[in-house]
Image: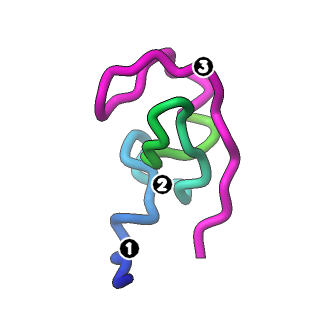
Amino acid sequence: MDTSYNDLTCQICMDAEVNTAFCPCGHVYCCQTCASNLYYCPLCKTFITFVQRIHVQ
């Protein structure tokens, strides 16, 4: 998988590295700081029930 820099950068603050996945939709979109301020997934508008910390290589 070829991953560009933009794929690893938080799409909200555009500064931190992406490190969270939203449950139940599974979208990976932003950093933990930004994710903690969200109630709905920015991509699919699903209500976020849990934010899982992930490690992207």
Q: Which disc is residue 15 wearing?
A: 2
Q: Earlier in the sequence, mark 2 or mark 3?
A: 2
Residues shaded magenta = 35-57
Which residue in the structure is indicated by mark 1?
Answer: 5
1 drawn magenta:
no
What secondary structure is found at the residue carrying circle 2?
loop
Q: Name the residue: 59% across, 46% down.
A: 20
Q: Earlier in the sequence, mark 3 or mark 1?
A: 1
Q: Name the residue: 55% across, 59% down.
A: 17
Q: Characterize the local packing of mark 3: few (<14), some (14-19) or many (20 or more) Cα atoms within 10 angstroms.
A: few
Q: Name the residue: 40% across, 27% down.
A: 41
Q: Amino acid at mark 3?
A: Thr
Q: Amino acid at mark 2?
A: Asp
Q: Quadrant of the N terminus?
A: bottom left
Left or right of residue 53, residue 3 in this image: left
Q: Earlier in the sequence, mark 1 or mark 2?
A: 1
44 drawn magenta:
yes
Q: Could you tell me residue 23's position as x and y percent?
A: 56, 32
Which residue in the structure is indicated by mark 3?
Answer: 49
Q: Name the residue: 32% across, 21% down.
A: 45
Q: Characterize the local packing of mark 1: few (<14), some (14-19) or many (20 or more) Cα atoms within 10 angstroms.
A: few
Q: Could you tell me residue 26's position as x and y percent?
A: 49, 42
Q: Could you tell me residue 33's position as x and y percent?
A: 62, 36
What secondary structure is found at the residue carrying circle 1?
helix
Q: Characterize the local packing of mark 2: few (<14), some (14-19) or many (20 or more) Cα atoms within 10 angstroms.
A: few
